[in-house]
Image (cartoon, grey):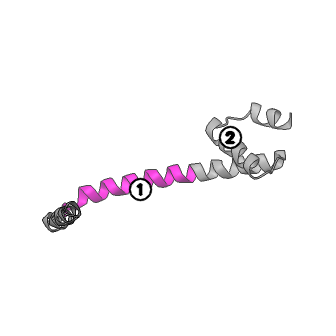
Amino acid sequence: MEAKQYFTDKDIDIITLGTALKYCLENDTLSFANLKDTYAYFQREGNVSKDMLEQLQTTSRECLRDHEPLNINQRDLSIYKDIIIKREQSHESI
């Protein structure tokens, strides 16, 4: 009842609340105080993650805009293909 009253008039994120409920059930922390604290923790972490993601996206766009693309050499895979072919042929002869 206490949880229902607390979360009814709040603007809650259902996914975060579900994550908090799952965490409390899995860790056998069944008090409302634990649920409230766990919800607040996951909500904070979610907001931090969103902020960090936005910052990372902004930074990567700036890097792409400000720098020339790198030339990357590709390794010749024929050596590895030859090894595989020789190994298959040796297994066929057995």
Contact check, label 1 and label 2, Cβ < 8 Å = no
From the viewer's side, name the closer residue of 54 and 3.
3
Residue 66: in sight, yes or no?
A: yes
Question: On screen, 12 above or below 46?
Answer: above
Looking at the image, residue 51 sits to the left or right of residue 34; the answer is left
Q: Is residue 75 left or right of residue 7?
A: left
As drawn, is 41 to the left or to the right of 57?
Answer: right
Secondary structure state at the residue bearing disc 2: helix
Percent across and percent down for residue 11 are 67, 35
Badge 1: residue crowd in 10 Å (few <14, some 14–19, many ≥20) = few
Point out residue 24 in the picture as x, y percentages from the top left corner.
Answer: 75, 48
- Numbered tag placed on residue 56 in the rendering: 1
Query: Which amino acid type is shown beneath numbered disc 1?
Result: Leu
Q: Quadrant of residue 12?
A: top right
Which quarter of the picture shows residue 80? bottom left
Is 31 covered by the magenta stretch?
no
Tag of residue 17: 2
Kind of residue at disc 2: Leu
Q: CA distance from mark 1 to mark 2?
A: 26 Å
Q: Is residue 22 above or below residue 64?
A: above
- Residue pushed farthest front? 94
**Front-lying residue, 35 or 90:** 90
Q: How many marks?
A: 2
Q: Is residue 36 visible?
A: no
Mark 2, Cα crowd under 10 Å, few <14 / some 14-19 / many 20+, is: some
Q: Quadrant of residue 74?
A: bottom left
Residues rendered magenta in the picture: 47-70
Q: Quadrant of the C terminus?
A: bottom left
Instruction: Name the residue rendered at 21%, 66% in the picture.
Output: 87
The disc, 1 or 2, on the residue closer to the chain's N-terminal end is: 2
